[in-house]
Image (tube, grey):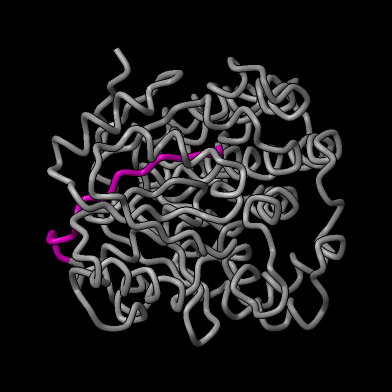
Amino acid sequence: MSLITYLTKIHFAHGVLEEAIAAETASLKIKRPLIVTDRGLTDCGLIERLIDSLDSPPKPQIYADTPSNPTEQACQDATDIYLEAECDGLIAFGGGSSMDLAKAVALLASHGGSLNRYAAIEGGVGRIRDVLPPVIAVPTTAGTGSEVGRAAVIVMNDGRKLGIVSPYLIPSVAICDPTLTLDLPSAMTAGTGMDALTHCVETYIATAYNPPADGIAIDGLQRAAANIERAVETGHDIDARREMMAAAMNGALAFQKGLGGVHAMSHALGGLTGYDLHHGTLNAVLLPYVLDFNAPAVGKRYSAIRTAMGLKHGTDLSEAISSLNERLKLPSGLAAMGVDEQAIQLAAPLAEKDHTNSTNPRRASADDYRQLMTAAL
């Protein structure tokens, strides 16, 4: 059986894409889908597997201009296509950016107005109603877990990278087929994999009380820590790919509980104009510094994290993550990614206001975030 139901319906198996797409488009009565994807997947031809799985005619509409950090303008452009073609559902095919953009299209197509008014920090959670068109999410990376997440993170026209959060944004169906990730380049495998690992760590130490999320996070962390290096070194190791996709799914199932300071900073930096920073890689670089910052406030939780990662008792978690980043050949610091002092000054106050800051174990100010990012240069 490939079917899992927890928060949403999930098909999870090798080669399940074709069967699941046919079944779920029929079940959801999607006849005219808009496929939201990116140029990398259209250029490499992987999207043909998806298109061949759909009943035709009509030929599906495709929006393939998803930016690496989805923007409000891109969301509006895709929404215009959706409405003009009278589409009746969306299929997100790609990484977290494509999935977040598809969620935003579903929101705009059904609610209208500016995306700003739906952002969590603008009081937008209560403005989102259960009237969105169906979204089928098909991840081709193992990182964000957006296929089972309730959030879309979008760079607004005013430059802020904001989270739009609602249970109604959780896709109607997720189709997790590890064979779609076999040819993902090693650098992208590392960055997205560390995104999944960070989700599991941050949600486990987040301040909200949610025992099921804690258990799911620890299970995801065990899978990520045991398999990320194999997935990076041997891309066609299908078992490692499966376990990383499971870790990504678990991380997002768990972060219903909340995240923390790593994401507060990566959201803030990721929205800055002119930098184009990869979210998962930012998380990897920032995680060691936030682990040290949060250490006085986490009690015994670091012991459980060490156990899940297979580390010896008393191992310095910050050093362990830094060592893992080095083995994965990820950047040694923010400067190596192109971050400079100007970016830090701009990002620090945005990080303090980010919705993920509220569940960090140790509440951080703009000055705290400024110091953390400066240390991470």
Q: Give the x, y percent position of residue 326.
A: 86, 39
Q: Is residue 253 visible?
A: no
Magenta stretch holds residue 269: no
In the image, farthest residue toward the top = 1
Looking at the image, residue 96 sits to the left or right of residue 241; the answer is: left
Image quadrant of residue 2?
Answer: top left
Looking at the image, residue 307 sits to the left or right of residue 105; the answer is: right
Looking at the image, residue 153 sits to the left or right of residue 194; the answer is: left
Q: Is residue 145 visible?
A: yes
Q: Give the x, y percent position of residue 177.
A: 45, 27
Q: Give the x, y percent position of residue 361.
A: 53, 53
Magenta stretch: helix, strand or loop mostly:
loop
Q: Is residue 29 above or below residue 338?
A: above
Q: Residue drawn at (36%, 44%), measured in percent from left and top?
A: 137
Q: Residue drawn at (74%, 48%), measured in percent from left and top?
A: 288
Residue range of the region highlighted in magenta in the rendering: 129-141
Q: How many marks?
A: 0
Looking at the image, residue 275 sits to the left or right of residue 97; the answer is: right
Q: Residue drawn at (32%, 69%), measured in percent from left and top?
A: 81
Q: Residue drawn at (23%, 45%), measured in percent from left and top?
A: 57
Residue closer to the observer: 65 or 291: 65
